[in-house]
Amino acid sequence: AQRVTQPEKLLSVFKGAPVELKCNYSYSGSPELFWYVQYSRQRLQLLLRHISRESIKGFTADLNKGETSFHLKKPFAQEEDSAMYYCAPNPDSNYQLIWGAGTKLIIKP
Amino acid sequence: SQTIHQWPATLVQPVGSPLSLECTVEGTSNPNLYWYRQAAGRGLQLLFYSVGIGQISSEVPQNLSASRPQDRQFILSSKKLLLSDSGFYLCAWSPDGFNEKLFFGSGTQLSVL
């Protein structure tokens, strides 16, 4: 079955430290991959998508087909990065994203 | 600009009662519309999506139904709520097509007692 895993439910790092939120998926091919974020008292929103190969708020995500991973990284964490992060691949290029369970990121001052 | 409205924000309903959650989108036409359920500690589960008026696709069998009576209106319903229907429901829209960015509503916390 198609599955996406975010192994860390909670990740806590100090401000200024590097951050890596892990995402692994269980299917082959070239899925379109998304990271969504939900800040406190805000709506769930798109952070970045693989196809755009962009950096948003200092975050980047690289697709590793060999490891079937799409980890989200930021070299220097900021307090405003504290949020819930969801990895969501679209393996079949249809309307259904497969959502990870999410990782709660806490940036300590 | 486009906006999405979802209401109510919270709802407490007795078991066996009907349900109607409404979602409307403004500022765009022919959007794809979605109903998701978000369980604590788990990812989002797609319940229904719609690519046009009267076109509803169901992803999981359940006690719920969805309707799209107008281009920018999406309704989640139930004739008789179950305890297991409790949860956080999110409406979302995306531009027409696949792999498009999703825009989410603010959600409805439904408690069935």
Image (spheres, coloured by chain):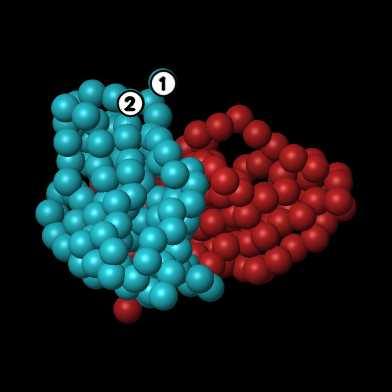
Q: Earlier in the sequence, mark 2 or mark 1?
A: 1
Q: What is the x, y in percent for residue A74?
A: 24, 60
The x and y percentages for residue A101 are 48, 43
Residue A1: numbered disc: 1
Q: Left or right of B38: which side holds B82?
A: right
Q: Residue A89's quadrant in the figure?
A: top left
Pick the quarter of the image with the N terminus of chain B.
bottom left
Amino acid type for the residue under numbered disc 2:
Ser
Residue placed most toward the observer, A76 or B77: A76
Badges 2 and 1: C-beta atoms under 8 Å apart? Answer: yes
Q: Residue at x 38, y 74 (%)?
A: A80
Residue with the mark numbered 2 = A26
Instruction: Answer yes or no: is residue B18 visible.
Output: yes
Which residue lies most toward the bottom here?
B1
Chain A palette colour: cyan
Q: Colour of chain B?
A: red
- For label 2, count other residues whose C-alpha is less than 10 Å away and answer few (under 14), some (14-19) or many (20+): few
Which mark is in front, 2 or 1? 2
Decide which of A99, A79 is in the foreground and name it. A79
Tell whether A16 sits left or right of B26: left
